Image (spheres, helix red, strand yellow):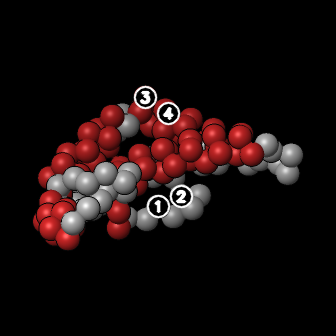
Amino acid sequence: MAWKDFQEEKKQGGISIDGHARSPEQENKLNELVASVFAGPNGQAVINYLRSISVDAVSGPNITNEHLRHLEGMRYIVAILLRRITSHNQGGTDARTRIVKPNKRIIK
C-alpha cells in the first residue's frame, strides 16, 4: 500500500468499526439500517437474546480455547450491532467513537 492509498482512504472516511473502509454516508446508512432492523418489539427481543448468549454469557475456567474464541467472535458481532444502534440513536456519523457502557441495555 502506497502513501497515496492512505490519503485516499482518509478522504473516503477511513476504517469502520468492523475493519472495512467506508465513506461517512455509507456508515450512516449502515447505522440506520441496523437500528431500523432492531427498532420494533421483535427486534428488541432478538437483540436481547443475542446479548444473553454472547455479551452477557459467563464462562467457567474449564472453557476450551476453541469455545472461547467462538464466544468472543459472537461478542464482537453483537458489539458492532450495538455500537451501530447507539451511533444512529445519538445522531452520530461515526460508530467508531460511540462507546456502549457495560451492562447498559440500549434496547429495553
Q: Earlier in the sequence, mark 2 or mark 3?
A: 3
Contact? badges 2 and 3 (CB < 8 Å):
no
Residue 70: % across, % down = 63, 40
Separation of marks 4 and 2 at Cα, in angstroms: 15 Å
Q: Is residue 86 visible?
A: no
Q: Nearer the viewer, mark 1 or mark 2?
A: 1
Q: Which residue is mark 2?
A: 104
- Residue 25 vs residue 19, the one in the foreground: 19
Separation of marks 3 and 1 at Cα, in angstroms: 21 Å
- Residue 79 vs residue 45, the one in the foreground: 79
Q: Where, quadrant-wise, is the N terminus in this rendering?
A: bottom left
The amino acid type of the residue labelled 4 equals Ala
Residue 57 - label: none
The amino acid type of the residue labelled 1 equals Val
Left or right of 90: which side holds 50? Answer: right
Mark 1 lies on a secondary structure that is: loop
Residue 94: % across, % down = 27, 62
Q: Which residue is mark 4?
A: 45
Mark 3 lies on a secondary structure that is: helix
Seen at 21% across and 66% down, the residue is: 2
Separation of marks 4 and 1 at Cα, in angstroms: 18 Å
Q: Quadrant of residue 41 in the image?
A: top left
Q: Nearer the viewer, mark 3 or mark 1?
A: 1
Q: Is residue 30 above or below residue 19?
A: above
Q: Which residue is mark 3?
A: 42
Q: Which residue is mark 1?
A: 100
Packing grade of label 3 (10 A; few <14, some 14-19, many >=20) is few
